């Protein structure tokens, strides 16, 4: 009994085994169907899904990058801000120091100048005083000579007059 | 009673035998082939309508639904294939198999017993299911060669041993017989019931047929996905022989 007989229920029963032409046609038909459905259905649909996934992935990556960039910028700005703060503090303290130095310099200069002026003034006064005294002494001597001349008129010659005046001047100078 | 049922079944066998419509040499066109063309025509027309009406313009709810469906299928097959990326690659093949088998199965739901030139479920014939299973077998071998190279593929076959090589040949048979047996039995059952009680009685069976038709389509494509997944897993192991072997052995 062959296999075909085993699958039959009676006389003239049909053949259940695969018919080669059906196998061929099915494979050909399926290949055509696959090609057509791929072109019209799967390619556009799966392509769109892939494209959207790519888009989402890209935007997620971009967001992460932007976030990292923002974080980096924030750190940069913070660093710059603290730098600026420190620099400002430095500038202020430098300026304060410089100001103090200038002030002290001006003060000391003023003080020394004042001292100098005072000394000059004192010196000038002293000198003027000395000169005035000398002038005064000379004037007094002349006056005394004049007076003495008037008193003793003819008794004294010029040499006597001079000697007398000098003695007088010396006496006045001692007082 | 039993004799009568057997007789009815035998009659329906006869009625389900393909009738040659166009007698081409070696590849005659029977009503079975025409039934396949009808299935193809339905799917292609729907695909073109969907392409023009839904995929062309802006994003619509219908398009979102389709994309969700694709996403679901991808998720479902990825659990057998390994990764979503690979599942997406083979989704057109598996999806087309699913749609073709589903619509083919549903072709048999409307009983056409008594009309010799009627159309019936193409999947109720072993030839059809064997054709589909051979497509899967060829695809699996093609993927093996593509992933591992010809040398890798031959090494893989030698490495598998004779029993596993035999399994590669047995797979198309088991895959095709499972689908054919289910749909054929369903058709015969429906035919016998229609012959016994033409009105109302077949309705529950038709309801069941709707369910079984979908289940068989899912089973066929899921098993195909598992075969593809097996090959991809093997290829991945062969690729990462130095890096991944230790990790694989550790498990």
Image (tube, rainbow, N blue to C red):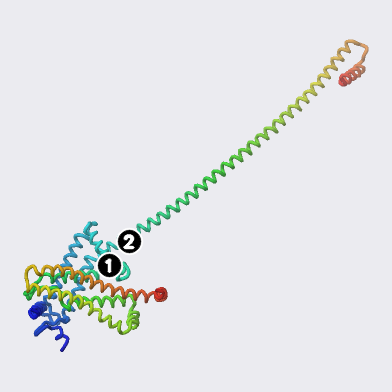
The answer to whether residue B65 is seen in the rendering is: yes
Which image quadrant is residue B7 in? bottom left
Mark 1 belongs to chain: B
Screen quadrant of the C terminus of chain A = top right
Point out the image quarter for the N terminus of chain A.
Answer: bottom left
- Residue situated furthest bottom in the rendering: A1
For this rendering, which residue is in front, A159 or A68? Answer: A68
In the image, what residue occupies the spot 51% across and 47% down? A82
Q: Read off the residue under disc 1.
A: B76
* Left or right position of A83 against B221: right
The relative height of residue A121 versus residue A4 in the rendered view (above or below) is above
Tell me residue B73's x, y (percent).
26, 66
**Residue B47, quarter of the rendered image:** bottom left
Secondary structure beneath dot 2 equals: helix
Above/below status of A30 relative to A139: below
A65 to the left or right of B18: right
**B160 or B38: which is nearer to us?**
B160
Where is residue B85 drawn, in percent x and y? 31, 67
Report which residue position mark 2 lands on: A54
Mark 1, secondary structure of its residue: helix
Residue B215 locus on image (x, y percent): 21, 70
């Amino acid at each position: 009994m062959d296999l075909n007989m085993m699958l039959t229920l009676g006389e003239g029963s049909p053949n259940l085994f695969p018919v080669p032409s059906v196998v061929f046609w099915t494979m050909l038909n399926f290949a055509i169907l696959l090609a057509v459905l791929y072109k019209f259905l799967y390619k556009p649909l799966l392509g769109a899904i892939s494209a959207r996934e790519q888009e989402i992935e890209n935007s997620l990556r971009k967001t992460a990058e932007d976030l990292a960039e923002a974080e980096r910028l924030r750190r940069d700005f913070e660093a710059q801000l603290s730098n600026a703060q420190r620099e400002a503090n430095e500038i202020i303290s430098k300026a304060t120091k410089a100001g103090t130095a200038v002030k002290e310099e001006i003060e000391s200069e003023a003080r020394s100048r004042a001292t100098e002026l005072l000394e000059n003034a004192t010196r000038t006064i002293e000198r003027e005083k000395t000169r005035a005294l000398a002038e005064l002494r000379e004037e007094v001597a002349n006056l005394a000579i004049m007076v003495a001349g008037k008193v003793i008129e003819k008794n004294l010659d010029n040499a006597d007059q001079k000697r007398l005046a000098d003695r007088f001047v010396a006496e006045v100078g001692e007082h | 009673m039993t004799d009568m049922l057997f007789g009815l079944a035998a009659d329906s066998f006869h009625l389900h035998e393909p009738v040659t419509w166009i007698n081409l040499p070696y590849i005659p066109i029977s009503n079975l082939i025409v039934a396949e063309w009808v299935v193809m025509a339905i799917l292609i027309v729907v695909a073109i309508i969907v392409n023009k009406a839904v995929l062309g313009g802006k994003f619509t709810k219908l398009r979102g639904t389709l994309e969700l469906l694709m996403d679901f299928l991808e998720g479902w097959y990825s659990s057998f294939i390994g990764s979503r990326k690979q599942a997406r690659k083979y989704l057109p093949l598996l999806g087309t198999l699913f749609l073709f088998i589903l619509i083919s199965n549903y072709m048999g739901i409307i009983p056409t017993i008594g009309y010799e030139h009627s159309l019936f479920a193409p999947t109720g014939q072993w030839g059809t299911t064997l054709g589909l299973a051979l497509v899967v077998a060829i695809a699996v071998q093609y993927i093996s060669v593509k992933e591992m190279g010809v040398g890798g593929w031959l090494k893989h076959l030698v490495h598998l041993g004779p029993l596993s090589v035999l399994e590669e040949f047995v797979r198309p048979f088991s895959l095709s017989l499972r689908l054919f047996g289910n749909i054929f039995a369903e058709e015969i059952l429906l035919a016998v019931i229609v012959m016994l009680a033409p009105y109302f009685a077949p309705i529950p069976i038709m309801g069941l047929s709707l369910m079984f038709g979908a289940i068989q389509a899912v089973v066929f494509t899921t098993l195909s996905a598992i075969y593809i997944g097996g090959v991809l897993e093997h290829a991945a192991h062969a690729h990462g022989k130095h890096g991944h072997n230790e990790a694989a052995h550790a498990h």
